[in-house]
Image (spheres, rainbow, N blue to C red):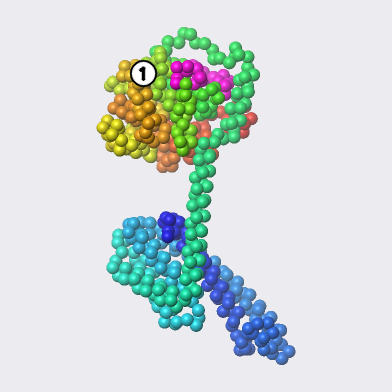
Amino acid sequence: MWAAGGGRESSAAVVLRVLLIATACGFVFALLHLPLPDGRARSAGPGGGERGAGGGGGVRLSAQQGRIPEARRLSVVTEEIDVQTDEIAAEEDERISKSPPDTKEKIWMMQDQLLMAKAYLHFASPQGSVHLVRELRLRIKEIERAISHSSGGTHVPASVLQKMKAMELTLSKAQRTYPRCSQMTSKLRAMIHNSEELVRAHQSESSFLEQVAVRTLPKGHHCLAMQLTAEYFSLDPIKREFPKRDSIQLDGYYHYAIFSDNVLASAVVVNSTIAASKDPGRIILHIVTDALNYPAMMMWFLTNPPTPAAIQIKSLDDLKWLPGDFSSRFKMKGVRDPRYTSALNHLRFYLPEVFPSLSKVVLLDHDVVVQNELTGLWDLDMKGKIIGAVETCSSSEGYHRLDSLVDFSNPNIFSKLDPKACAFAFGMNIFDLNEWRKQGLTETYHKWFQLGKIQKLWKAGSLPLSQLIFYNKTLPLDHRWHVLGLGHDFSIGRNELESASVIHYSGKLKPWLEISIPKYRDYWNRYLNYDNPHLQQCNIHG
């Protein structure tokens, strides 16, 4: 009968309120049948009662005036009982929630019995069996005590089970004695069912609206992209390029890659990386975006150059060597979240081809903030590994082991990987591109990807696939390099955040969305100048 603990508890409260209202109505009905002050009975209908000589109207008016305060008092009492019932129910629910599953089930059965017994008791006919009414009251007290004693316990005593059986027998008697009450029970159950359906509908609506908020670009961001794009195309073609820096020796610089279609998110990554660096003049930032957002991305950094660092921006369309269906090949049936279907997320598997002249590169997701110097990553001894990453086994992320991301029922995976191996985090990683080329890892990616097209072997997105491709090729990094979870975990401490080199808003609650976690917003907002004319015109505020 009950869909879930939460839904049942709220429904029980609804039924209790119905019973209280019915009880109040019974009190008012009794008042209407009280004797008049002179001892005479009230009339059964209009004109049917006896009047006193010359003063019948005055007596009736006086009685009505006396009933009004009484009715008001009953209304107040009913409200007080309602509040007290809610408080008691909340305390009881907390105790029940701490009980084992078997005990909870028995308690819920007793609560069900209690509701039915009270329904029979309150709607019983005054001319009914006095013995049965007394028996119902006795059973109600027994079950209430049994619930109180069982809540929070590890098991249900045998004596309680006997009381439950006794209550069942009494309820059977009541059903035979008051056949109409079975209709009332059905009605109450229907009300409970309707309430549960309403709760489910609201939960579904809430989940849907959250998904809309996550996937939809905020209005201000859309305005910014449109405005920047229009300005870019109004520029003279000669002014649409960054100043040339022919003197740059690629291996003498620190190279950071960002694959993103979000202008402001990319701006925060760029600004924070430069602010954290002790030698920003030796930084080269490489941004790859899609063709649609390329003009806006270019215009933003043309008007807000990351001086003294150098920047390079490319479109996916500039990478002519990519497969022809690259932008659409990652769409999956039933998966609409752009985090899982974005071609930019899968571009990481082509890093050596994107940067053919580089030996090492740090790849940053667009939902990170760099807080400390990262040049130490280039000095790490990679020990023949291709990627450096933080393990997630002890983090707040929802994934920890490979078996939570990959289907180990498939022999192709079971025979090659350890299901209990620790999953690695992506979002801030150092890559040894020379080692990548040496081991032919791009070909490994193609093999896994083609296998995944034939049968579903992993969850949606590029993360599970990354775990397969970089299996046994990953160097674990100290956790202070990369703290994750700011997009879903409310419990990350301030000390942990401020000691991290990179903080990552992994999860749905991105810092540029209104649904982001408030206590983490300032870490992101501090790297945007909200006095910027473009942000002001599009009403984007911190």
135 left or right, relative to 201: left
Which residue type carries mark 1? Leu
**Where 487 sits versus 273, above or below?**
below
Residue underneath mark 1: 433
- Tell me where residue 61 appears, x and y as whole percent: 69, 80
**Quarter of the image where the N terminus is located:** bottom left
Q: Residue at x 51, y 27 (%)?
A: 261
Q: Is residue 309 magenta?
A: yes
- The segment highlighted magenta reads 295-323
Residue drawn at x 28%, y 34% as measured from the top left: 411
Q: Is residue 279 above or below residue 335?
A: above
The answer to which image quadrant residue 431 occupies is top left
Q: Is residue 303 above or below residue 62?
A: above
* Nearest the eye: 155 or 168: 168
Residue 131 as seen in the image, left or right of residue 204: left
- Please rate how many residues cluster around mark 1, counting C-alpha atoms within 10 Å: few if below 14, some from 14 to 19, many from 20: many
Q: Where is residue 68 drawn, in percent x and y?
A: 63, 75
Picture quadrant of residue 419: top left
